[in-house]
Image (tube, rainbow, N blue to C red):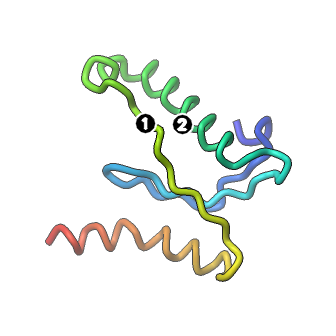
Amino acid sequence: MQEEQNFYVLEMEVMPDHVHLLLDVDPTIGINILVSRIKGKTAHILNREFPELERKLPTLWTRSKFIATVGSVSLDVVKKYIEDQKTNESRRKK
């Protein structure tokens, strides 16, 4: 999927109700369009693999998304933030 869409996943963390992705994206492709394609493709794959999802959920993904560019901080800082999300989530639940 990545090569045909001209992007690379640099970092990813799956949370209970959302996903953090750090992507390196071809600038000729709109990031908003790319994220919508990722959501569509992953929904299709998950619904095919787990048909019970379609019965339990009206939709796998919402239309909302938060997109920010990295420029004012280093990639290492963003990667560390994403990696730390699981740890921070565990601490909040205690």
Residue in the picture at 61% in, 43% down: 35
Amino acid beneath label 2: Lys
Callout 1: helix, strand or loop? loop
Mark 2: give few (<14), some (14-19) or many (20+) Cα within 10 Å.
some
- Front in this rendered view, residue 35 or 82: 35
> Toward the viewer: 63 or 50?
63
For the point 70% across and 35% down, which residue is it? 1
Q: Any mark on residue 61, and which?
A: 1
Which residue carries the number 2 mark? 39
| Mark 1, other Cα within 10 Å: few <14 / some 14–19 / many ≥20 | some
Q: Is residue 7 above or below residue 68?
A: above
Q: Quadrant of the C terminus?
A: bottom left
| Residue at 49% over, 58% down | 20
| Residue 72 drawn above or below residue 61 | below
Secondary element under disc 2, as helix, strand or loop, is: helix
Q: Give the distance between the C-alpha atoms of the residues marked 2 and 1, in whole angstroms.
A: 7 Å
